[in-house]
Structures are given as structure tokens and as C-alpha cells.
Image (cartoon, grey):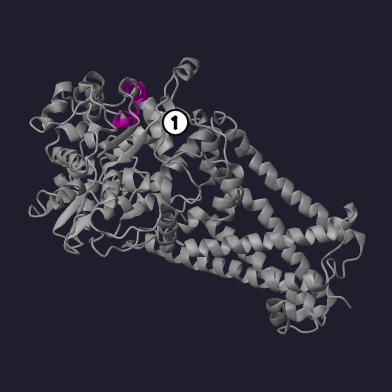
Amino acid sequence: MEPTRTEFLHMEAPGFRTAFYLLTAASLAVMFWQFLGPARLWMKGKPLTWQPDVFRQFFDNVLGQHRVKGSRPRTGAPMHLMIFYGFVALFLATTLLAVATYGPLIGIPNFHKGGYYMVYETVFDVLGLFFVAGLVWALVRRVREDRKQKSADPEGAVPLTTEAKDYWALTVLLMLGVTGYLLEAARISNHPQDWDWCSPVGFALSKLAPSLPDAAYVGVWWFHFAWVWAFFAFLPQMRIKHIVTATLSLSGAPDRPMGELVPVSMKEVEETGKIGVSHATEYSRWHLLSLDACMSCGRCTEVCPAHNVGKPLNPKKVVADIAGALRTGAVVSDAATEEALWDCTTCNACVEACPVAIRHVDLIVDARRYLVAEGKLSGTGATMLRQVGSTGHAWGAAPDVREDWMKGLDVPLARDGDGFDVLFWVGCAGATDPGAVKTTKAVADLMKKAGVRFACLGSEETCTGDAARRVGDEFTFQALAEGNIATFRKYGVKKVVTPCPHCFNTLKNEYRQFGAELEVQHHTEFLQEQVQRGVLRPASPEPGKLAYHDPCYLARVNNVSDAPRSLVGEDTSLDSAQSELMRAATEEVQASSVLAEPVQHGRKTLCCGAGGGRMWFDEEPGRRPSDRRIRQLLDTGAEEIAVACPFCRIMLDAGLKGIDENIRLVDLAEKLHEANR
């Protein structure tokens, strides 16, 4: 006989099949009906303003599980991959079996036999073990973490949200796998064939109950499918509904840089009568769908710098609160709380950590826009907005003060009329903050030493509007952007270099929304090129004596972490694609042989607390993210701390005071300048 198997063994009577098809159809109908309600809510959102790259993102983020692979191993990524790929394998096996069984109805011959059948049985029998093992791992892990969180000392617990339905979900999935193997074993025991060995798991289990009666086999068959129907019927009520919602969300995600916020048009304001989001239905349909893709894994909360110093912000809770507001019609800022929304540094750690690509920063900034428009921002944050609106400088300095740093240095200005290849964008902090001015002077001198034809705007430079946009004042940002772009066009600017990662991100990723066509580099990238050209020497600190703090808007948001390290002699010979793959596999840049790397570095860096406009907000003692970051940097044992961001420098300098006044805080450009005197 040719190797194959009978699908409805001992159930030849028509009633058996009719009952099977009716129960399957009913469970699927119940599932789709339950998804229909949330889908109606998603459709209340705004239509998409982007064209998603569905196929690429489906293969990368769903089938490829790219986002899950890049997460930290201790948060359960290997476990999730075992469950996911095991589930995909079983789904594929079921699909192939269905095609072979019902294909003859449309002219496709039954191919489930012979050598194909034996390979099919072996491969999927083994792959199913990964599914079962991953689920057992998940159950044990959830029990352990649940106990930790309920104990008096929950330190080290993963911030999972555990409810009875979570254990039910894992039980249903586990029973799908276990009863599938039991059914296979029952078939082999009841109806043995010479080729049964090609199903190793079922074949081994069949030895436990040889010669199973026909009625017992039929009972096992119905028992298995009862769990299949339970899975369909209960799926929309459990967190594992992300099998559906996350697949849709990941496939339709906006294909734009992490650091790019969506602009608000005046036409939109005229049509709606408001700026920003007051009610959840004012988010896009994709954002509303992504809320239902959340499975409360807590990775966003685990990496949130505000939450980890005791502030009210909890990104996981913000997502849940907005989802709740969608169902109840509550005001978003009431549901998520204004205090939590203002706590966000927009560092995007939550966005990077989220395995289903939820854009927490989008959700928060849109809610902030509404609060600002309603006059609900007060204190130092509001003062910053007034200053930047009136003077074009975030600290309120007059335009001519921007040229004070360059007195006596013979720095070329664009208005002088001499040709230049590179515009040196100094930034608000770089022109006026004492520490940042040191960086500015070092970069200018290094450009001269490298023979670069550059110029500054001086008093014609105004704030890029980064802080205003992220605080929520969209139209102040747009006014600043349009003014700066007009200046760029006036002088024919094509290439910009800046020491500020916030200016870098805004100029690179957001000014193009208003027609700017610029090549933008962070000063570490530009200086790396000069070192590679051989016109500048890299710094050579004593190994282990220098720690480097990666700025969020440089390393995480714009994936620049190799260039800064190259300036101190670190080997960064891998190309950017290789580096990205390495970071995805190992979470971070490779361990440094020169730098004393803190625990969190590269794309996994820990925020200093300055982003999102938080630089200008009053901070409670004991709740400053910069204090936590300083402790990490000091734990390296380094004698110097290098930075590559004026905001980080200001925040870390404040954190150092009262802890260790002997530690030197220095920009990488200054280290390079010292090596090239």
C-alpha cells in the first residue's frame, strides 16, 4: 500500500461530517462576529495618509519576526519564536492537508500520499514539539513572574499583566498541540501501518496504549476538535488575538523614520476645528488597530526612562487607557492623564521595544497637541514655547547672541558671500550653553584643519523647532521650519552638519515634509569621514578610561552608533547593513575594546531625560532620568564621560553635581580636537 492516512477514520456516516462542518463553521462565525465590533471602532479613525508596504512588512515583521528577534532574550523572545514558528508550521500543515483533501472537488488531485506524505509527517511532527515546548515555557515563565510581582520584593520581574484569561489562552494553545499528538497516537494505535514510524512523536506515544478501540479513537478525535473550536470561539477575547490584529498592524505600519512626526495641516484644523487629538477616534485607523494588537507584554514599560524613575508614565497603561477611551468615548488626556502624557521624553525606547510596532510617541504627541492648543501647558514648558516663538531661541536669547561664541575665531558666515560646501548648524544650545559652546568651537576648528569649506548662519539661524513640535506646538514648529528652509534656499544650502542630534533628526527627517532637500550629518559622522580621509587623527584614550553615552536621537532614532565610536579608535569596519544585523541579533553594538561601555548602550541606550521638550520642564528630585543614567556611566569605572549631544551634556552635568565632581564630561569632538592640536 502507498503511505497515506484516512481523515475521517471510523466516521464514515454522513452525520459525523455534517456535525464537524457545522461546528467548525459556527466557531469561525463566532470568532469573526467578535472581531467585527473592534473593526467598526477602528474604522471610526481617520483614513490612512500613507501607502503601507504590506508585503515587505508582512515578510519582515510577521513571518520574519524581525521586531521580536531584536528584543532582549530575557523578555522571552526565544520562547515567543518557538510558539510562533511552531504555530505557523501547524497552520501550514493543516492548510496543506485541507488542500489535499478538498482539492479533488476543484480538480486538484489528492497529493497527501507516498514520499510527500512521509516527509510531511516527519517534518511537522517534529516542528510541533517547538510549539508545545514554547507554550510550556510560557506557562512556567508567567507563573514565575506573576509570583514575583505579587511578592514583597518584585525586583527583576518582567512587567507582565496577568489575568485568568491569559492562563486560559496558553492552556487552549497547549491543548491544541497536546491533543493533536494524542490524536495521532490514537490513530496509529487503532489503525497501525508500516510507515507510522515517520511520525516519531505520535509513534512513540502510541506505544502507551496499543490496540486502542474504535470508539476510543473517535472520542479522542472529537476531544481534539473541541479544543480547536474553543480556540476559534475564544480567540478575540484573549490577548492572543494579536495573531490577527498584530498581523494586520505590522503589515500596515507607516513606513517612516522613527523620529518623524506627522504634520498637522491648516486645512485639517479648519475642517475639524481643533488641533491634535481629544478623542481616540481622531487617531488614524492604523493607530486604533495597533491598540488592539497590544498584548500587554510590558516591554515598553520596562525600557521607559520616565517610568523607571517613578514617574506616572507607563507606556503600556497609556495604550490600554487610550483603547479604553476608544470604547467609552472618554477624552484621551483624561483617560491617560495629563501628567503621564507630559512625562514622555519621546526617546522612542518604547517604540523600538514594541514587538507589534505600536507608535506610542505618535499617540502621546497628538494628545499633547490638543492640550497645548487648549492652553493646558503651563510653567517652564510654556515659557520655552513663548521664548522660541518670540526670539527663535529655545532659551530666549536674542539673535545676535548666536554669534558671541565665534568672536575672534574667524568663523565664516553665509551672509559674507563666500562660497561654502557645508553649512555648520550650531543649534540653540551650541550657540549659548557654556558646555555646548566648547563642542561648537572644537567642531569649527576641526573643519578648518580638515580643509572643509563651511559657513555658519550666525544671527540668521533660528531654532529648528524640535522641542516645540514634541511638546505639542505644531504650528510654532512649522513656522520655524519654513523660515529656516527659506534661509537654506537663499544661500543654496545642500549639506548640513550639526552637533545636536535633535536638530539632526528634525532637519533630516522632518524638514522634507515642507520641501527641504538636504543632506544632513551629525558631527560625529562628518568627523568620521575626515578621519577616514586621513586629514584628522582619531583620539586614543586609554582603554577603559572613557565611557560614551549614546544619545537617543542619534543611536536609537537614527541608528548612528558606529561613527561616534570610530572617533576614539574603535573598530567600526563593518558596513551599516552588517552592523544593523548584528545589533538586531545581539541587542546592542558589539562590546568595546576601548570604551568602558555602560550596561545600556547603542540602540538600547538609556535616555538622559532631555527629549520631548523635557529639558525645559521642572523635575522633582529623585525622579530625574539623568541621575539613573549617570549611575550607569559611573558604574563603568571610567574617569571621563563622552557625549555627542548638547542636551545630554546639560542633563548629565546636572546629574554629576553632588555625585562625583572629578569626572570630566566632554564631547567626542573635543576629544578629537585634543588629538589634532
Q: Pick the residue in front: 388 or 487.
A: 487
The residue singled out by tag 1 in the image is 262
**Figure quadrant of residue 361:** top left
Q: Position of residue 74 (x, y in %)?
A: 41, 63
Q: Position of residue 608 (x, y in %)?
A: 25, 46
Quadrant in which the N terminus is drawn: bottom right
Residue 617 seen in the figure: no
**Up/down of 670 relative to 336, above or below:** below
Q: Position of residue 289 (x, y in %)?
A: 55, 39
Provide the residue span drawn in magenta. 466-484
Q: Pick the residue in front: 101 or 142.
A: 101
For the point 26% across and 60% down, which residue is it? 597
Residue 472 part of the magenta segment? yes
Q: Is residue 605 left or right of residue 359?
A: left
**Up/down of 121 relative to 599, above or below:** below
Residue 231 part of the magenta segment? no
Q: Pick the residue in front: 234 or 362.
A: 362
Q: Amino acid at mark 1?
A: Val
Return the residue found at the far right.
Answer: 13
Report the magenta stretch's main SS.
helix
Return the residue found at the far top.
Answer: 270
Q: Pick the residue in front: 117 or 554.
A: 554
**Up/down of 479 relative to 341, above or below:** above
Mark 1, Cα crowd under 10 Å, few <14 / some 14-19 / many 20+, is few
